[in-house]
Amino acid sequence: MNAFKDQSFQDRVARAAEAKQKALDALRAKPPADPEEVAARQAAREKREAADAEKRKAKQAAMQAAKEAKAAAKSVVAPVARTEAELKAARDARYAARKARK
């Protein structure tokens, strides 16, 4: 039975260089990209990006409208102006409650 023999560093470097050269040759062997196809892909990408930008703008506008509506609803609810007699009655009730606790 043959024993397993580790590869030397030079063997590994040579195999890596060979694999790299093989990959480069395969890449160079590919036909160049068709300009019409490249232009079509570019147009599709730009169209998709424009649609995404439009969606983002619509979403931001909706969020801003909701924020403004919330702020408007808050400002509509104004504190109710109480008369001096009502304030005195509330103060007296708090005072009576504090006395009752003791």
Image (spheres, grey):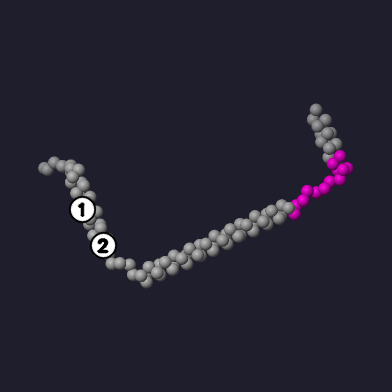
Decide: is 63 above or below 47. above
Residue at image position (75%, 52%) is 77
Amino acid type at circle 2 is Arg
Residue with the mark numbered 2: 28
Q: Mark 1 or mark 2: which comes first in sequence?
A: 1
Say if the magenta span includes residue 82.
yes
Which element type, helix, strand or loop, lies under badge 2? helix
Q: Residue at x 84, y 46 (%)?
A: 82
Q: Within 10 Å of the Cα at label 2, are there few (<14), some (14-19), or many (20+) other Cα atoms?
A: few
How far apart, in angstroms, are the residues tagged by discs 1 and 2?
15 Å
Three-letter residue code for mark 1: Glu
| 72 to the left or right of 25 | right
- Return the residue found at the far right: 85
As drawn, the residue found furthest toward the top would be 102
Determine which quarter of the picture holds residue 20. Answer: bottom left
Magenta-highlighted residues: 76-88
Between residue 61 and residue 94, name the one nearer to us.
Answer: 61
Q: Quadrant of the C terminus?
A: top right
Residue that badge 1 annotates: 18
Above or below, comparing residue 71 to residue 100 in the picture: below
Write the residue at 22% across / 51% down: 17
Q: Quadrant of residue 23?
A: bottom left
Count of labels in the image: 2
Q: Residue furthest left?
A: 1
Left or right of 52? Residue 99 is right
Measuring from the top left, give residue 80's x and y in whole percent.
80, 49
